[in-house]
Amino acid sequence: MFISIITDCQDGNAQIRQQTRYSVLFPGVPSSFAGAFSDIEAAGNLIDVLDASDDQEGIIAVNVAPRHGAARKWPNGTPFGYLWIGKILVVCTIDGEVLSLLKKFGLSDHVNVTDIRTVLAFGGYDQEIIDRAATSQFRSFDYLPRLARIVWDKKDVPSEKLMFTDIPDAALDVWRIDSFGNCKTTLLPEDIAFEEGAEREIILNGLAIKATCYKQLRTVPNYQTGLTMGSSGYGSKRFLELVVQGSSAAKHYNITQKDTFQIAK
């Protein structure tokens, strides 16, 4: 069994508190941790962890819960939900693009949305803990691990089903820039009619970028721009990456994570 934590609450203090709580609730189960700066980065990491799991049992906790901007529509940040993908329990925030790539890959069709007070009462927690979790600014510590334990034990808890038809589609985003400056996009090969050696054009930050399609990074000529089938994805479906062979595509084209782009006709 494994526990993987993907969250925007990612400084050292937040990390050790979350991992300690999961260790207490799931004794002997190792946990891994990845910070995310946006909902789409969390979504991409979720796909990659599912892929890495080889369908073995485990828990993936995904949390991106800002309180500003559009998120102010919620009383105290986005609600949390859960869903099962085979033997893997995903507990997660539901707002934004967090679940958009699960939708794109067809890995689920709904999420079960929970109410903190209702679920913790159902799980037998006392009123002081319930009140603190419901009003906490750190619900990924005060609620999410407990939700995981309750659902893991009972398999189902009081909730309302939210169909993925009501979840936003994934935008055309750069969801991750790796350590080499390669830009992982939300594109799958079928999104651009990928064909080895064919040229495609994307518009990013007002700049038209022409890139040639290559199945493997090694076949991109030195210092040329390519769209390659990257390592990230699930099963046979792999995200396309914008690369510059021998250099950083991110630096070359001034790309940052969560930059959106268009595909030229």
Image (spheres, rainbow, N blue to C red):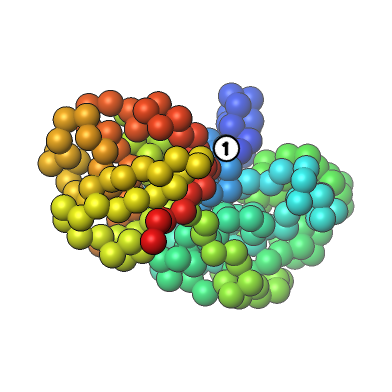
**Of residues 162 and 228, which is closer to you in this image?**
228
Using residue 67 as the reference point, say whether residue 54 is left or right of it: left
x%, y% of residue 66?
71, 43
Residue 203 in the image: above or below residue 114: above
Q: Place residue 176 in its image quadrant.
A: top left
Tally the marks. Answer: 1
Say which residue appears at 39% left-offset and 49% top-offset.
202
Say which residue label 1 marks: 37
Mark 1 Cα-neighbour bin, 10 Å: few <14, some 14–19, many ≥20: some
Q: Amino acid at mark 1?
A: Phe
Quadrant in the picture for the C terminus: bottom left
Say which residue appears at 31% left-offset and 45% top-offset.
210
Q: Secondary structure at mark 1?
A: loop
x%, y% of residue 249?
35, 32
Residue 119 in the image: above or below residue 16: below
x%, y% of residue 38?
58, 42
**Of residues 83 and 96, which is closer to you in this image?**
96
Q: Place residue 113 in its image quadrant.
A: bottom right
Say which residue appears at 59% left-offset and 24% top-offset.
12
**Of residues 73 and 186, which is closer to you in this image?**
186
Using residue 179 as the reference point, say whether residue 154 is left or right of it: right
x%, y% of residue 133?
79, 47
Residue 116 in the image: above or below residue 218: below
Do we see residue 156 in this rendering?
no
Do we see residue 236 in this rendering?
yes
Say which residue appears at 43% left-offset and 71% top-offset.
106
